[in-house]
């Protein structure tokens, strides 16, 4: 194998982590006062909030590892014959992290104890993974800006030094923008559609219902699989033995704002982000006491936003233009802009290009108006310029409309409920349900912008549900299994405020699929567009199953796992079912001259003549795709010495070719002989079985070579310095 190919296969850098678990580990070495290893010391790792206990026994080298710990705060107790009991309080385990606690036991009786109050080692020394932890204190107490949207846990990611940007531009650890993944309790909250934190945030609970989380950027072990640039691991909050909760309201109001520079009055801007949370043991008086075994946590967050027009500047036709009068159509230097008659286009006698005649007096006769254009224009005649320019002066017909009326309301509601049940000393079951309903609608007095039906904004409706079910089984003191199931649903709808209003008898573009469904969309090159698309959106339902088995033997911590994801991507829509038309100044300008305004012309003049340069219509569509993913891994964390740990393993990933439930895939194949073109290459081909089909459910070939070796090491040079290295193939 050539060296260049080896360099490609052994990639040092970022890999995306779809299969990341949110569970953490506590590990370390137990020694006596001389520094010698203490074998067979007994450890109890006890949750501060639920008193759940995980046990371990040190190896012949005095080492221990307690895996599969839910994020939270723990107390460690260590006992050995002839030594005082060792206690360490407030050990914080963040999502997907390993915390190191080394214990020095003192000679004495077990009935005596020594409590260590120093903080646990915060520097990751046990693996090559590069992580940034966001502690629960930061999640609970860092203020988040309420600026047009509900608080988002992704805003907290900014505290990680490796995170840059936000929304679709977010990148982690130097990776590509939008190439990250985010998990909730070990399963992805992504939509399989775009790397947009706003969409992913809909699948996560309220900030009040999240606990510690981690941002990982590099050096990933075999348990982490699939593609490109870092992961954020969120863990949902559980109830504790104490009843606790919160209530809040974050308020913004235009009464506290200053007036905008162009605005005659303050714009409406009223926001409330409010909610509550409550958690504790399930307790039914005289019937059931759930302390130490049954817990609940519930959270609600609501967001209400009413935003006004904010003095947006638009461009609208002047009243005389609706009559075909463009005598006052001027450029930025107040010079007339000529309107040319496209019906007079002819060859230039000089032999170069074409020429046209200017409409007399720059006025289009009403007899030349297209009937459909006149019907559509009737809805805009009541919208006149309102910006203070005198007729005929500079700027009279450009940037001439300031939006001062209308509002947009944005109600959002988010609920989450979590339950945990501890069954004996070996089993724990948990369940989480999170739902979000997001709406963005015009206010009761209309939208901020042009009045309906000309408004070019969209109504938006998003509905999501996320479910998580997990079972932890402590098989023995050195073997733990964690199995979890997840289901996400994500439905996004966007549509014009004009849909379903019986347009057929009012206005109809000829030959469109269904002009009754929606007011047509009209686009101009110099004016604000009119109308918006009809129903369109996406459904992203999916479910996943994941199992991780941890086994500790001597200096080795083995981990084996499997993951399956069944992700659907269903695009639906009828955007231009009512028709869309584009108009340009080119149709009424000097032929071949594209330098506006020297070219002359007006897109509104072209519109009145019905001279469109583009148009669209479409049938109702539903593109349903299913992507089935499987991942398998085996890995070992081998603590060779107290300073050196090696992480090695292998992973296999495969995503099957996408399929459609009704085998409706079709595509253009540039090499397929076309019987309608004398066998020349280039023809449509169709998935499925039967006449004219390819005999396969997918037109995409499968690839099954996703074998990924991983190797990493972490060397503790001293208590303040760790050297890491990692490589792998993804």
Image (cartoon, rainbow, N blue to C red):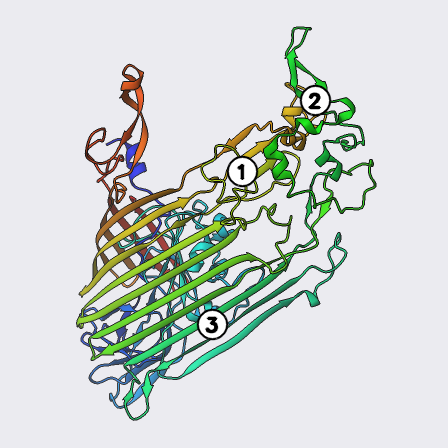
How far separated are the C-alphas under marks 1 and 2?
27 Å
Looking at this view, is 206 or 438 the one in front? 438
Report if residue 622 is visible in the image: yes
Return the residue at label 1.
508
Please tell me in which quadrant of the rendered image residue 334 appears: top right
Q: Name which residue lies at 32% across and 81% down.
A: 87
Is 264 or 362 nearer to us in this picture?
362
Is residue 134 found left or right of 663 in the rendered image?
right
Q: Nearer the viewer, mark 1 or mark 2?
A: 1
- Residue 566 coordinates in the image, percent (x, y): 27, 51
Q: Quadrant of the N terminus?
A: top left
Whichever of labels 2 and 3 marks the residue nearer the N terminus, that label is 3
**Residue that numbered label 2 is attached to:** 340
Mark 3–mark 1 distance (CA, rounded to whole Å): 59 Å
Q: Is the Cβ of the residue at disc 2 closer than 8 Å to that at disc 3?
A: no
Q: Is residue 685 left or right of residue 436?
A: left
- The location of residue 76, given as percent across then percent down, is 31, 78
Q: Secondary structure at mark 2?
A: strand
**Callout 3: few (<14), some (14-19), or many (20+) C-alpha neighbours within 10 Å?**
few
Q: Is residue 67 shown above or below 13? A: below
Residue 170 visible somewhere in the drawing: no
Say few, some or many: other residues with alpha carbon within 10 Å of mark 2 (under 14 / 14 to 19 / 20 or more).
Answer: many
Q: Which residue is mark 3?
A: 137
């Amino acid at each position: 194998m050539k060296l260049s190919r080896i360099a490609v296969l052994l990639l040092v850098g970022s890999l995306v982590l779809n299969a990341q678990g949110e569970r953490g580990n506590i590990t370390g070495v137990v020694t006596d006062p001389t520094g010698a290893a203490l074998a067979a010391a007994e450890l109890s790792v006890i949750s501060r909030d639920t008193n759940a206990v995980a046990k371990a026994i040190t190896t012949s080298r005095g080492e221990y590892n307690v895996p599969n710990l839910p994020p939270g705060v723990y107390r460690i107790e260590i006992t050995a014959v002839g030594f005082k009991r060792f206690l360490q309080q407030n050990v914080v385990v963040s999502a997907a992290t390993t915390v190191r606690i080394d214990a020095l036991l003192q000679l004495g009786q077990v009935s005596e104890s020594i409590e260590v109050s120093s903080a646990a080692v915060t520097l990751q020394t046990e693996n090559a993974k590069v992580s940034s932890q966001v502690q629960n204190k930061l999640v609970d107490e860092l203020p988040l800006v309420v600026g047009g949207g509900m608080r988002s846990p992704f805003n907290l990611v900014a505290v990680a030094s490796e995170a840059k940007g936000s929304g679709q531009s977010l990148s982690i650890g130097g990776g590509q923008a939008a190439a990250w993944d985010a998990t909730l309790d070990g399963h992805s909250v992504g939509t399989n559609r775009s790397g947009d934190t706003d969409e992913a945030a809909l699948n996560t609970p309220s900030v009040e219902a999240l606990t510690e989380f981690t941002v990982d950027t590099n050096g990933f072990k075999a348990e982490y699989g699939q593609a490109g640039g870092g992961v954020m691991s969120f863990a949902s909050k559980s109830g504790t033995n104490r009843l606790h909760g919160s209530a809040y309201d974050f308020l913004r109001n235009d009464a506290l704002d200053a007036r905008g520079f162009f605005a005659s009055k303050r714009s409406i801007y009223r926001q409330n982000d409010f909610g509550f949370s409550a958690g504790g043991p399930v307790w039914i008086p005289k019937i059931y006491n759930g302390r130490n075994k049954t817990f609940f946590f519930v959270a609600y967050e609501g967001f209400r936003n009413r935003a006004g027009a904010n003095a947006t500047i638009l461009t609208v036709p002047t009243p005389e233009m609706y009559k075909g009068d463009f005598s006052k159509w001027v450029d930025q230097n107040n010079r007339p802009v000529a309107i040319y008659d496209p019906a007079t286009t002819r060859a230039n006698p000089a032999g170069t290009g074409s020429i046209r005649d200017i409409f007399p007096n720059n006025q289009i006769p009403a007899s030349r108006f297209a009937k459909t254009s006149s019907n559509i224009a009737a809805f805009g005649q009541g919208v006149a310029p309102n910006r203070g320019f005198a007729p005929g002066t500079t700027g009279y017909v450009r940037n001439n409309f300031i939006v001062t009326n209308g509002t947009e309301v944005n109600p959002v509601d988010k609920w989450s409920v979590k339950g945990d049940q501890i069954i004996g000393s070996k089993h724990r079951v948990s369940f989480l349900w999170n739902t979000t309903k997001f709406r963005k609608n015009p206010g009761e007095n209309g939208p901020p912008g042009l009045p309906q039906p000309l408004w070019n904004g969209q109504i938006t409706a998003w509905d999501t549900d996320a479910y998580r079910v997990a079972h932890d089984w402590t098989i023995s003191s050195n073997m733990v299994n964690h199995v979890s199931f997840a289901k996400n649903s994500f439905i996004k709808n966007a549509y014009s405020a004009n849909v379903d209003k019986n347009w057929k008898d009012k206005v109809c573009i000829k030959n469109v699929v269904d002009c009754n469904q929606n007011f047509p969309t009209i686009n101009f090159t110099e004016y604000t567009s009119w109308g918006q698309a009809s129903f369109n959106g996406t459904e992203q339902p999916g479910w996943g199953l994941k199992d991780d088995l941890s086994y500790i033997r001597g200096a080795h911590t083995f981990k084996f796992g499997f993951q399956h994801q069944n992700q659907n991507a269903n695009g639906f829509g009828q955007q231009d079912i009512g028709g869309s038309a584009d108009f340009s100044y080119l149709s009424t300008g000097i032929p071949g001259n594209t330098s506006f305004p020297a070219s002359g012309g007006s897109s509104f003049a072209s519109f009145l003549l019905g001279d469109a340069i583009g148009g669209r219509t479409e049938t109702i569509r539903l593109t349903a795709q299913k992507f089935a993913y499987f991942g398998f891994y085996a890995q070992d964390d081998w603590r060779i010495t107290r300073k050196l740990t090696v992480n090695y393993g292998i992973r296999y990933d495969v995503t099957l070719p996408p399929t459609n439930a009704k085998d409706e895939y079709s595509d253009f194949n540039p090499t397929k002989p076309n019987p309608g073109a004398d066998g020349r290459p280039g023809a449509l081909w169709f998935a499925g079985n039967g006449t004219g089909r390819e005999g396969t459910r997918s037109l995409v070939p499968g690839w099954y070579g996703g074998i990924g070796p991983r190797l990493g090491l972490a060397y503790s040079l001293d208590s303040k310095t760790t050297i890491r290295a990692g490589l792998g193939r993804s």
